[in-house]
Image (cartoon, rainbow, N blue to C red):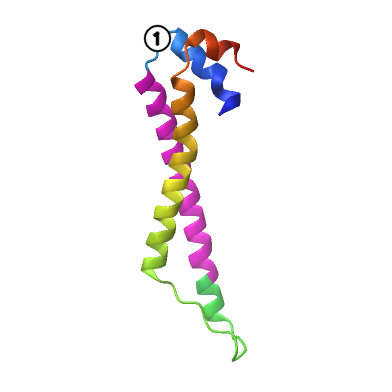
């Protein structure tokens, strides 16, 4: 977020409110969560389906796709991504525009 502090300062200087800035970063985090979650879920389910179609040695079990595991991983991804995107933006949005523009 430190590399975007100047951007936040510029937006505040031209009239963006704290809520506008937080809404932007929340939307970016949500899009990142959806895209990475869909990509990861597709890859994981595809890999499980592929492993179920090939013969495996007796000591290697076939993978099982569990809806609870999918739900837990999506929730964990959502919390981490949104926290990582919004918390630093919240701190930067609290700065005065002059401070944010001067920030390096």
User: Would residue 14 appear left or right of 102 to someone viewing this image?
Assistant: left
Q: Position of residue 16 (x, y in %)?
A: 40, 14
Q: Residue at x 37, y 28 (%)?
A: 23
- Could you tell me how many numbered marks the image carries? 1
Q: Quick check: 64 above or below 70?
A: below
Q: Residue lying farthest right?
A: 104
What segment carries the magenta color?
18-47
Q: Quick check: 49 above or below 41?
A: below
Answer whether residue 76 is visible to the viewer in this image: yes
Q: Residue at x 49, y 60 (%)?
A: 42
Q: Residue at x 47, y 28 (%)?
A: 89
22 part of magenta stretch: yes
**Element at label 1:** loop
Q: Residue at x 41, y 27 (%)?
A: 24
Q: Quadrant of residue 27?
A: top left
User: Would residue 69 appear left or right of 50 to someone viewing this image?
Assistant: left
The residue carrying pointer 1 sits among few (fewer than 14), some (14 to 19) or many (20 or more) residues within 10 Å by Cα, namely few
What secondary structure do most residues of the magenta stretch adopt?
helix
14 part of magenta stretch: no
What residue sits right under mark 1 in the picture? Answer: 15
Q: Position of residue 104 (x, y in %)?
A: 64, 18
């Amino acid at each position: 977020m430190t590399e975007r502090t100047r951007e936040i300062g510029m937006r505040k200087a031209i009239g963006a409110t704290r809520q506008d800035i937080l809404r932007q970063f929340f939307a970016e985090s949500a899009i990142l969560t959806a895209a990475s979650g869909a990509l990861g879920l597709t890859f994981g389910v595809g890999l499980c389906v592929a492993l179920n179609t090939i013969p495996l040695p007796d000591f290697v079990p076939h993978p099982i796709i569990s809806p609870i595991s999918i739900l837990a991983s999506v929730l964990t991804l959502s919390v981490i991504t949104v926290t990582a995107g919004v918390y630093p933006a919240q701190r930067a949005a609290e700065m005065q525009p002059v401070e944010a523009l001067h920030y390096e």
